[in-house]
Amino acid sequence: MPASFCGVLGYRPSHGLVSTTGVLPNSQSLDTVGWFARDPSVLRSVGHVLLQLKTLEPKRMRRFIVADDLFQLPKVPKQKMVYAVSKVTEKLSGYQTPSHMNFGQYIASKVPCLKVFREESINQQNGISTLKALSSAMFLLQRYEFKINHEEWIKSVKPKFGPDVSDCVQAAITSKTDSIKNLYKVRMEMRAALQSLLKDDGILVIPTVADPPPKLCLKKGLAAEFHDRVYALLSIATMSGCCQVTIPLGKHDDSPISVSFIASHGTDNFLLDTVVDIYSSLLEEVNIASNSSPFPDIDGNMEASELLKEKGNAAYKGKQWNKAVTYYTEAIKLNETNATYYSNRAAAYLELGWSVSCACDWFFFFHLLLKAFSLNESPFNSFQQAEKDCTEAIFLDKKNIKAYLRRGTARESLLFYKEALQDFKHALVLEPQNKVSNMAEKRLRKLIS
């Protein structure tokens, strides 16, 4: 959190790997000794000393896993975080295309002891219920161990603290926890869950914090809400004991923003090497995304894939068909289950096919000849790609009328008249008054007869 708010790199090592000798314990099951730096090489060098790491380690394939549900929390454009990470993995060697997951659902299924700490009234949306339960368990464990460590001294010395600190100390000293065993079970289950997910080559991508730094004299109710959202995200590495790095990504609305990478316990060298490897390229992509047009000005809740779709739509309107195909392809890479992306790309492919065919006065003369020899040349290749995309869109959404219309058009262009007729007839079932379908059906019936 401090690194995120100050716009610098911050590192939380795997629990127990850096000596805490000489450090007054707060909660020994959660405490770690971390460090800050402005330069990733310095961050790694400090890690090599404190963690006693080997200078050289064989480079291995890296796979990023984006916690999509957690990126619904911040009010920051996602292209500054998720999109930048995705673009970097395409350019650098040794990185797989990022996968996406609902982290809250995963933890709910893998950490059964969290049920004890879940408030039934909390909305399950975006995994908030699960993370709220996780942060509650973290606070209870912290208070329990703080009380064991310091209760006697506080009661005998009666030290004076500031208002906020005094409230926290008093809450810990007077706390009564009935489920101590479950607290430690949650910790064990969290580490096992992250280990199973990440293994030794995975990196979980999450927002570091959900909100910008709080203003001075923030109202108590708002402050409580702010802390709930912050600690929900911080509890992931804290309760699992995994290593975490915070990477600054510039500013949004004059406030620093950042993204965090979490790797499994004990893979600190791997995570520190990743930061050094990716940092400069990541900042470059952030700058490109920030300055790009026509990136829409959104409220921060739009998916990275949706941003790419909007860029594709803008390119399509500008009759830049190849660019539109590229943007829709990027959107599909981020989300392979969205029928609209495939259908939109099909529309761009159709335009590409027509632009080539219309440029040739002799196109229709060779149309039948090319089909007879089954040549896979443009514009036929574009029409075939359009047909393929529409088929995928229909598989994902059986009621996508645009996909039926576009597939029918593609098939008609490929001279598959009977198949095209079936598509237009299906479109009429979905929308009986559709003029395009009606005209196409009449035209195709004449061609077939």
Image: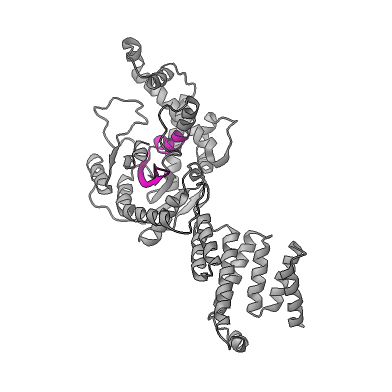
Which quadrant of the structure image shows residue 164?
Answer: top left
Q: Which stretch did the figure color magenta?
A: 229-258
**385 horizontally vs 437: left or right:** left
User: In the figure, 225 relative to 412: above or below?
Assistant: above
Q: Is residue 146 something that shows in the picture?
A: yes
Residue 108 at least partly seen: no
Image position, residue 1 (x, y; %): 38, 36
Whole-percent x and y of residue 300? 50, 47
Report how many numbered discs are placed on residues in the image. Answer: 0
User: Does 142 sit above or below residue 197?
Assistant: above
Q: Is residue 376 left or right of residue 15?
A: right
Q: Nearer the viewer, residue 269 or 446?
A: 446
Q: Say which of 230 and 108 sits in front.
A: 230
* Residue 279 position in % (x across, y down): 32, 52
Position of residue 142 relative to residue 199, above or below, is above
Q: Residue at x 42, y 19 (%)?
A: 167
Is residue 250 shown in magenta? Answer: yes
| As drawn, 437 above or below 396 | below
Residue at horizontal 46%, vertical 45%? 76
Spot the residue most to the top.
156
Q: Foreground: 409 or 294?
A: 294
User: Which quarter shows the C terminus?
Assistant: bottom right
